[in-house]
Image: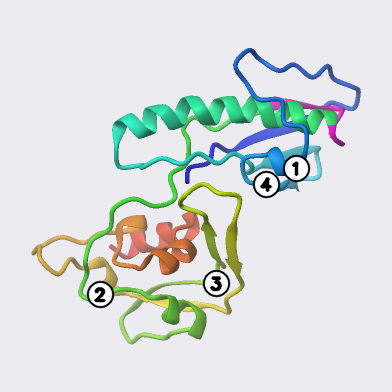
Amino acid sequence: PMTLMFTMQNTGKPVTPVLPEGCYDYGDVSDLPQGRRLYWEQNNDGTLLVNMSRVKANGAKIEDVNYAETEALKQVFSIAYYLQKTGFETYALSHIAPQTGVRETNQIEGLYTLTEYDVVSGARFPDVVAQTNYEIDIHSPDAKKTTDERKVSGYDIPYRCMVPDAIDNLLVAGRAISATHVAMSSMRVQATCYALGQAA
């Protein structure tokens, strides 16, 4: 599923929660899109980074992406309203990401496919081009309120994952490399994608 990230800022004084027309009045944690509260205080300046929206859509289809942009924005306003009533009474919505984040779409079939076993076993490869220790982090593809989170100790990503099996003179970096669904949930984060881009 897709997520639209946003931040809230501690103003130091009570704010008046506002729920825009067409949004959702979440009453309990179980009503939230992910069924949980997921946020981080950042920079010691009262900034709250919020990752709580969840939209089931196919990021490779423009109709789904258009729907997700609207639905995710409704969820953001609704989540901010919920948070302002449940512990963040002095926080105001301060920034919304310019685009809803897509975790996974299409990938190449490469000379090698990174697997769940590679990730959990800490695989090492002679043609390593990037490394990560980001956890397995599967947000339920059917957008139900489940998540598969597993810590990993670190592993290599081999060059062969960037080389398409059926196309010559092409290297592929980032989320489109050859990896299984589970492996992708760990290697898809920005820092790893940067490293793959630099390698390519």
Q: Secondary structure at mark 4?
A: loop
Residue type at numbered disc 4: Gly
Q: Is residue 129 left or right of residue 169?
A: right
Q: Mark 1 touching mark 4, by CB under 8 A?
A: yes
Q: Is residue 6 above or below residue 183?
A: above
- Tell me where residue 153 sits by quadrant: bottom right
Question: Dot 1 lies on which element?
Answer: helix
Which stretch is magenta? 86-94
Q: Residues within 10 Å of mark 3 (few under 14, many from 20)?
A: some
**Disc number for residue 160:** 2
| Colour setting | rainbow
Q: Which residue is mark 3?
A: 133
The answer to if 91 sits in the magenta stretch is yes
Q: Does residue 10 show up?
A: no
Cα separation between marks 1 and 2: 43 Å
Contact? badges 3 and 4 (CB < 8 Å): no
Q: Earlier in the sequence, mark 3 or mark 4?
A: 4
> Which mark is drawn over residue 166?
none
What residue appears at the point 25 percent right and 75 percent down from the top-left corner? 160
Residue 75 lies, in percent from the top left, at 60, 30
Residue 90 placement, left or right of 93:
right
**Callout 2 amino acid:** Arg
User: Looking at the image, which is closer to me, 41 or 54?
Assistant: 54
Residue that numbered label 1 is attached to: 29
Between marks 1 and 2 in the image, the one whose residue lies nearer the viewer: 1
Residue that numbered label 4 is attached to: 35
Around disc 2, counting alpha carbons within 10 Å, would you say few (fewer than 14), some (14 to 19), or many (20 or more)? many
